[in-house]
Image: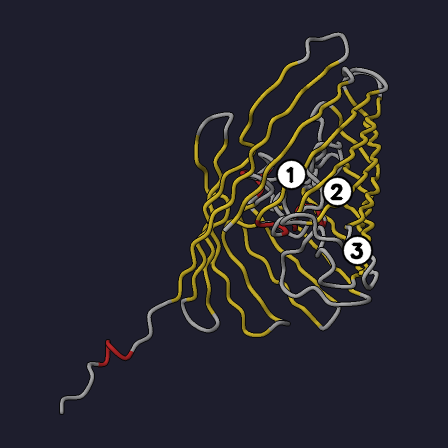
Amino acid sequence: MSATPAFAQTPLPTVTVGAGLQTSAVIDSPDDGDTTTQFLIPSARLYVNGTVTEQIKFMFNTEYKPATSEIGVLDAVAQISFKPQFNIWMGRFLPPSDRSNLYGNYYSNHWAVYTDGLQDGYPFAYVGRDNGVMYWGQFSKLKVAAGAFDGKTTTGNTDVLGAFRAQVDLWDPEDGYYLNGTYYGAKDLLAVGVAAQVQDGNSAWNADFLLEKKLASAGVVSIESQYHQYNELGGYDPLYLESDGAYILGAYLFPQTVGIGKFQVLGKYAKANFSEGATEDYNQKTTEIDLNYLIKEFNARVMIFFKDTNFSAIKRDFMQFGVGLQVQM
């Protein structure tokens, strides 16, 4: 009996393929302007992940941009993992930054993420991602990360951008580098994190907090908060050198199953201050209220949202009401 050829004994790399879609209907009502209704595709993604060896993996994801009808490279990263305490990533990925960036719009607890003038105002090359290299490690309930990123594609400045983050989980630990905005009761979480980015003497930093507790058979309560400060690095308004502010978010997931899902109510309030700009200083206040129907958590959920945005000067107030649908596989 002949021996099996050596190449036939070599296991093939494992590859997983997935997709995500967010679509919405939005009524936009500005002060002193006409009310409009739009049917939008905020995001559509393809996910490819694979294992080369036990220690080497890769991730390649794409993002559809409706404004240009183009598909761009979201993530393209080689991941080397010797053990939980020592991981190296190189390519394009989410750099060390605030919790909001590390959970992204598909794993946030609310719909209108990244619209409050604060959340993830760090500079980026593409959809929160930067090109560079990073170390991250998990030491039980402590997680740390530090990286160096290409400045030209991120801010236009050729100096290297440094990014850092540390997080402590006081209750259940969060495994892995990426985070969630909620675990829908799968974890009892009390997490505190700080992050900072620096480039050419300019800086941005934040502190973030998430508490989530399953109340036995009485549902799940979540409280999330972040403080941000941008000093000539990042921020939402390029005409202003400095901005700062905070938000607080609270949510309650009802325990009863209604039909094929569960209901969740959510409220968020944020205030962002903009200074050192082309004209007078101003602030932005954002209030969001959501009624969410969770069919399969992040893989199938319907989110009815109301958002009221007010400015003290410069910009025009507006309100939005809409329905968003998210599906992933």
Q: Earlier in the sequence, mark 3 or mark 1?
A: 1
Report if the CB atoms under discs 1 and 2 are less than 8 Å apart: yes
Q: Is residue 225 above or below residue 291?
A: below
Specify the label residue 123 is tagged with. Answer: 1
Q: Residue at x 63, y 60 (%)?
A: 177
Q: Is residue 57 above or below residue 59?
A: below
Residue type (three-letter) at the residue carrying disc 3: Val
Specify the label residue 204 is tagged with. Answer: 2
Q: Secondary structure at mark 1?
A: loop
The crowding category of the residue bearing disc 2, from other C-alpha atoms within 10 Å (few below 14, some 14 to 19, many at least 20), is: many
Q: CA distance from mark 3 to mark 2?
A: 33 Å
Specify the label residue 67 is tagged with. Answer: none
Where does residue 147 sit, x and y in percent of width and height? 62, 55
Where does residue 309 sit, x and y in percent of width and height? 78, 24
Residue type (three-letter) at the residue carrying disc 1: Pro
Q: Residue at x 62, y 44 (%)?
A: 301
Where does residue 326 sit, x and y in percent of width and height? 58, 41
Q: Earlier in the sequence, mark 3 or mark 2?
A: 2
The crowding category of the residue bearing disc 1, from other C-alpha atoms within 10 Å (few below 14, some 14 to 19, many at least 20), is: many
